Amino acid sequence: MNESTRKISAGGADRLQRVLGAFDENLNLIAGELGVNIRVDGVAVVISGAEERVAQASSVIENLLVLAGNGESLEKGRVSYCIELAKEGKAADITKLSSGVVAITSRGKPIKCKTVGQKRYVDGIKQNAVTFGIGPAGTGKTYLAVCLAVQALKQKQADKIILTRPAVEAGEKLGFLPGDLQTKVDPYLRPLYDALQEMLGLETYTKLMERGSIEIAPLAYMRGRTLSNAFIILDEAQNTTREQMKMFLTRLGDGSKMVITGDVTQIDLPDGKKSGLEHAAEVLKDVEGIAVIRLGDKDVVRNPLVMRIVRAYEADGNGRRKLEEQTDQ
C-alpha cells in the first residue's frame, strides 16, 4: 500500500486548538481510529501513513476546521461521527449540520442536529403530517420530536401537544405498580416529562399542563377521539400492536402533525405479536404525506460507547439469524 504525507494549515492557533481537543484527545482519536500518524507543526497538522487512510484523516481534519471556524463545539462524539462519515467518503456532510437551530431550551441553549440522519428526521417532521422515526437508543428520536412540538406550540402552529406511549415494558405489567392509573403510567412517560421541562422550564411547563395545552396519557386514552390542531407524539411505538397503531393513526384530525418513534430491536410484546410499528412503516412507506426515517448506529449521539454497544448487539442478532436459517435448511 502506498505511503503518503499531507500537511493541513489550521489558519490560526485558536482554531487548531479547538480541533486538537483537550490534551490532543481529538487528534489521538483520529489517529487511532484511522491508523495514521499525526503531528502538529506550528499552526498546521501533518498526517502520514497509508494513502487511503491519510486521505480520510485529512478529510476529517479539514471538515472539523470548518466547524471550528463556525464556532461549533467539537466534542468527542462529533469527532467520532465525522470519522465514521470519512470512512464512507462523506466527511463533508458534517458541515451541513452547522447551520439551523431546531429549538432553544428554556436556558437559551440552541438545539441542533448532530448527525445527517437526525437532520433527515427533523426535515421529515417539518415536511410531513405523519413521520415515523425508527432507530436505536440514543439517536435523539423522542427528544427532537419534543423540541419540534414545543416550537410548534410557541409559534401557534399547534394548539396543544399530546404525548402518549403504550403501557408495556420489559417484564412488567401496570397491575404490579401501586397507585391510581396516572401514578402507574408516570414512570413510562418520564422521558417525555424530562424533555418538556428542559425545553419549557418547570414553571411554564406546569402552567401549560394545568391549562391543558400539554396532555400526557397512555395510548388507550386515544381511542374514540379526533385529534385536531395538535402536535402528537407516540413514543416507544415498537410496543404497539397492529390494531393499536391503526387506531392511533386514524385519530389524526385537521391541522395536526404526528410523530411515531420506536426501536424495533426492543420489542416487549408477548411472543407471537407483531409490532404495529414494523407493520405500519412497511405498509405506509409510499403514502404521500408520510415519512419513514430510519436512524442507525452512526446516529447515536450519547457516549460513543453506546454506538459500539448497539453495533455489538446488531452483529450478535445477525449471527443468530444466520444460524437459525442454516438450522432450518
Image: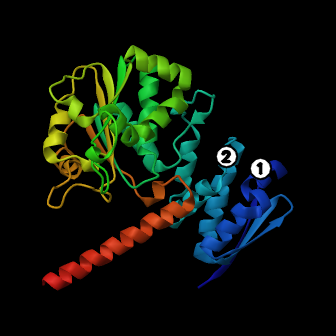
Tell me where residue 183 sits by quadrant. top left
Q: Position of residue 307 (x, y in %)?
A: 49, 62
Vertical arrangement, residue 307 with respect to residue 158, above or below: below
Three-letter amino acid code at the position of disc 2? Ser
- The residue sitting at 42% across, 17% down in the picture is 210
Three-letter amino acid code at the position of disc 1? Arg
Tell me where residue 311 sits by quadrant. bottom left
**Residue 73: image tag:** 2
- The residue sitting at 54% across, 25% down in the picture is 202
The one of 149 and 51 positioned closer to us in this rendering: 149
**Which residue is the extreme one toward the right?**
42
Q: Which residue is mark 1?
A: 15
Q: Position of residue 36 (x, y in %)?
A: 67, 75
Residue 89 shows up from this direction:
no
Q: Earlier in the sequence, mark 2 or mark 1?
A: 1
Vertical arrangement, residue 321 with respect to residue 277, above or below: below
Residue 275 shows up from this direction:
yes
